[in-house]
Image: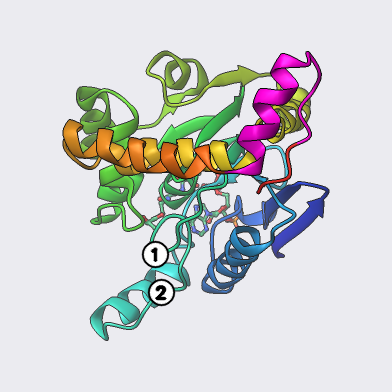
Amino acid sequence: MGIDYVKEGKIATIILNRPEALNAITPEMLRQLSEAFVDFRDDEQLMVGIITGAGEKAFSIGADIETMLPEMKKARVQKLPEPPTIMCGLTTWKPLIAAINGACLGGGLELALACDLRIASENATFGMPEVTLGLIPGWGGTQRLPRAIPLAKAEEMLLTGRPINAQEAYRVGLVNRVVPLPQLMSAARQLAELLCKPAPLAVRAAKQAILQGIEVTLEDGIALERQLNDSLLTTEDFEEGCRAAIEKRRPAFKGK
Ligand code: CAA
């Protein structure tokens, strides 16, 4: 029970491993998730992360109601810090893929929304049921969902708490693709390998430009793009990428 964190070459996989409770996130799991994200961000060998849930029923159905929500209440009342995660407080420009293997609700959907790409199995469902508990999302859901899908659909999900299925999630652009459950992890892995091919510093700069750029004016966003582009123009990988293109061979990027 908890979080499994596995590194294979350039790819790290984080597994929410509490299938008997539909991978509901306990305080201990949140701490372990935080540690895994810090390691993923800082490990120079790692380029891409995949996040998934154990079992065939759920990615995660969110905060554990019996343990996580009381802890959250205590922490917020006492103004104690929460372990930093990609949902709140921790930023990584390395790309993250959510491989969504079933119910993806509340904090589970917030975790998936904090990833860059989302692949869903055909049995996946997506929802923000917090209002049915007398709450609203607490890990960025009200902010990231309307940035990810059309506003009317985001409001419908956030105000009613009713879930949508994988096909609808695909239709509204919440997920990049839908695959049969047995193919989920191989599809995620293929995508991760694809993300390992381009120059890593360029991939990270693209993510940074996109995510910081949507928060600012177009003019400031273009200035940010220029600044990031300028820093890439002086990298060894840029030289290598151009040389390889001219020599019609695969580039050997070093992340420098
Ligand atoms: N926390 C802890 N346990 C949960 C849980 C949760 N959030 N949701 C479900 N479970 C448990 C159930 O108690 C049950 O345990 P037992 O087998 O020991 O009784 C087990 O998971 C399976 O649940 P169900 O029997 O209800 O299974 P189901 O297939 O009929 O329904 C479900 C599945 C649709 C996910 C339903 O359980 C459900 O709607 N759960 C609530 C999910 C929810 O409200 N999530 C939001 C949490 S708040 C949050 O995440 C806030 C935030 O922003 C951080």
Q: Does the residue labelled 2 lie within 8 Å of ligand 1?
A: no
- Residue at image position (34%, 80%) is 75
The three-letter amino acid code for the residue at tag 2 is: Glu
For the image shown, how many numbered marks are present on the structure?
2
Q: What stretch is highlighted in magenta?
A: 235-252
- Circles 1 and 2: CB distance less than 8 Å? yes
Q: Residue at x 41, y 20 (%)?
A: 173
Look at mark 2 in the image and give the residue it sits on. Answer: 82
Looking at the image, is mark 1 or mark 2 nearer the viewer? 1
Badge 1: residue crowd in 10 Å (few <14, some 14–19, many ≥20): few
Give the quadrant of residue 4. Answer: bottom right
Determine if the magenta segment contains residue 140: no
The main secondary structure of the magenta stretch is helix
* Residue underneath mark 1: 89
236 in the magenta segment: yes
Going 33% across and 83% down the picture, which residue do you hit?
80
Residue 241 % position (x, y): 67, 28
In primary-sequence order, the first of circles 1 and 2 is: 2
Q: Where is residue 113 in the image (x, y as percent from the top left)?
A: 43, 41
